[in-house]
Amino acid sequence: MIDILEKVQQLELETGLRNTACRSRFFVHPKTTAKVCLFLHGFTAGPYQFEPLGKALFKQGYNVLVPLQPGHGLAGDWHSHNPPPLPTDIKTYLEFVLEWVKIAKTLGEKVVVGGLSSGGTLAAWLALQSPQEIDRALLFTPYLGNQNFLFDILIKILPIYFEWFNKDASGNFGYKGFRVPALRIFLELGEQVLKQAQNHPSAPILMVCSESDRAVSRSKQQDFFKRVVKQQPKSWYYCFDDSLEIEHRMMTKLEDNDYEELVITLAKAFIGSDLTWKQFQDMAIRIVQGEAYEKIQQELHLDAQTSQYLSAMMTQSFGCDNLKCINPHHG
């Protein structure tokens, strides 16, 4: 299977990418690991978004795959009259992620999937589509709808080319613009997974969002989580407080997140834990109230490492009385 990864990287070299940041990232041990992580980058972005988390989980003992998605990261003079060749049929992406799940299964005993924004939407689809095959799904501010519902309407009808408002922001190595139909398919997929979660079992899901994220609909993320946790109690919800100013591109310091380590710590804790949502909430409250985490660890039968991750994350990111970020009923 390592041969396939090498062929992917060779093909990318031959095709020509915008820059090295867009290349697929594979952090692979010389043997099969207990868990293998498959991460999906955001719309118009690239695998660079998951490099910090990928490296951290590799050091943790996992194999990690971050493939470049179809039509992304290619070299070219892209603009409104020559838009980047992004797919406009969601089947292209769904077939892509299913193929990568097959590859991942050869590199780990259990498959963990995750994604940012539209990549999170794809990971949500996988969690609902194949709950028996997916051990965990990490959804980093998944794109289930826009914060402004008027944008949802416009995306569904407009055929125009759109340039990102932050196209020249630091850490933006992907495309600066796109034709709206290429994004529309993810909005439609988001609506599909929201509906499917109503009465369909899912793999355990970690929903990570931020109050400072002005791009996507947090209310739809919360609705999705409420539906998922009813049938899959081992799911968690975590929303970063507005005071941290963690915006939509939350995976790296290169982009919008000065608290990159909090995302990594949360991911490590979720991947290694079997805590239910109720247990996670109770633990958060007790830690914030100053209770010794050694006692909590013993009562919840947590391994020392997972307990340490959770304690560190909650101590760093919770304000003195701020518990709203663990409550999906807050809007």
Image (cartoon, grey):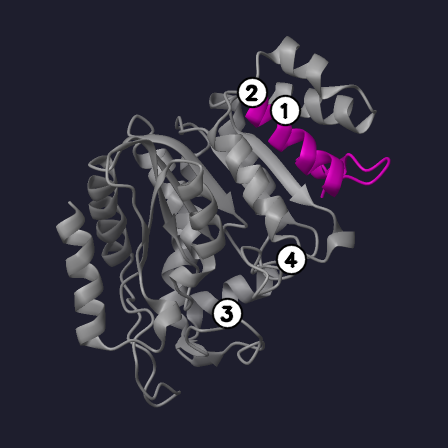
Q: Secondary structure at mark 1?
A: helix
Q: Is residue 322 magenta?
A: yes
Task: Report x, y in % for residue 6.
Answer: 18, 57
Cα separation, mark 4 vs mark 1, equals 23 Å
Cα separation, mark 1 vs mark 2, equals 6 Å
Cα separation, mark 3 vs mark 2, equals 39 Å
Task: Report x, y in % for residue 194.
Answer: 46, 41
Mark 2 — residue?
276
**In terms of sequence position, does the residue under pointer 4 or pointer 3 come before the other?**
3
Mark 1 — residue?
280
Q: What is the number of the mark on residue 154?
A: 3
The mark closer to the camera, 3 or 2, is: 2
Span shown in magenta: 304-331
Q: Secondary structure at mark 4?
A: loop
The mark closer to the camera, 3 or 1, is: 1
**In terms of sequence position, does the residue under pointer 4 or pointer 1 come before the other?**
4
The mark closer to the camera, 4 or 3, is: 4
**What residue is at 49 percent from the left and 44 percent from the top?**
139
**In terms of sequence position, does the residue under pointer 3 or pointer 1 come before the other?**
3
Task: Report x, y in % for residue 228.
Answer: 49, 30
Q: What is the number of the mark on residue 213?
A: 4
Q: Secondary structure at mark 3?
A: helix
Observer-nearest of 148 and 265: 265
Main SS category, magenta section: helix
**Disc 1 residue type?**
Phe
Q: Is residue 36 magenta?
A: no
Cα separation, mark 4 vs mark 3, equals 20 Å
Observer-nearest of 139 and 59: 59
**Disc 3 residue type?**
Leu
